[in-house]
């Protein structure tokens, strides 16, 4: 990078000096040539950039991304559980905790709710409503 800046400065100085020292009738042609020279100096790093090879994500980066996505999945799971508990309380007057199993693919995209486990038995209309809202046919009861 240092060499690039030095060559750019040298080209600018040469251009300025030749513009000052050249006769008036040749200045137009000299400026065109010097413009090409400066453009060549500016574009000189392009072949080096083209030959650069980008490395794939390092495993540490991929691991951090996976941990981040797992954290998001966990937070979504907690939000769905809280929503189910709140829905049961608001719509049916039932106080029950929920535990859900989310369907998450390899790319960490949530496809839906696979299973809902409730802390107490709820009426059939509440089961039907949960199944309707969350698209889950597997609703279990874990009575303590």
Image (spheres, grey):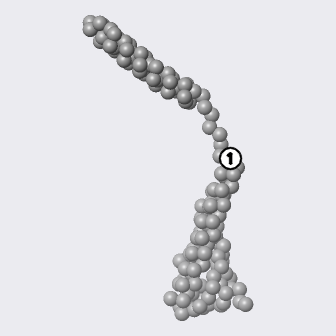
Outermost bottom residue: 93
Q: Disc 1 on helix, strand or loop?
A: loop
Q: Is residue 66 left or right of residue 28?
A: right
Outermost right residue: 144
From the image, tell me which residue sits under label 1: 58
Q: Quadrant of residue 114?
A: bottom right
Quadrant where the N terminus sits is top right
Residue 110 visible here: yes
x, y (%) of residue 142? 71, 86
Query: Looking at the picture, does residue 107 appear above or below residue 45?
Result: below
* Residue at 34% from the left image edge and 10% from the top image edge: 21
Q: Quadrant of residue 69?
A: bottom right
Give the tally of numbered discs: 1
Residue situated in front as seen by the camera: 63 or 84: 63
Residue 41 visible here: no
Q: Quadrant of residue 120?
A: bottom right
Q: Is residue 39 left or right of residue 70?
A: left
Residue situated in front as seen by the camera: 80 or 123: 80
* Residue at 73% from the left image edge and 90% from the top image edge: 144
* Residue at 65% from the left image edge and 51% from the top image edge: 61
x, y (%) of residue 125? 56, 88
* Residue at 41% from the left image edge and 19% from the top image edge: 13
Query: Looking at the picture, does residue 62 appear above or below residue 11?
Result: below
């Amino acid at each position: 990078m240092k060499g690039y800046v030095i060559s750019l400065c040298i080209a600018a100085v040469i251009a300025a000096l030749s513009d000052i020292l050249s006769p008036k009738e040749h200045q137009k042609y000299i400026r065109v040539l010097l413009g090409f020279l400066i453009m060549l100096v500016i574009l000189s790093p392009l072949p080096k950039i083209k030959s650069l090879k980008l490395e794939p994500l390092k495993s540490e980066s991929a691991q951090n991304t996976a941990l981040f996505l797992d954290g998001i999945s966990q937070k979504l799971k907690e939000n769905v559980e809280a929503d189910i508990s709140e829905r049961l309380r608001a719509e049916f007057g039932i106080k029950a905790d929920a535990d859900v199993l989310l369907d998450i693919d390899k790319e960490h995209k949530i496809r839906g709710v696979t299973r809902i486990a409730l802390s107490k038995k709820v009426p059939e209309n509440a089961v039907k409503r949960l199944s309707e809202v969350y698209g889950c046919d597997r609703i279990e009861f874990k009575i303590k």
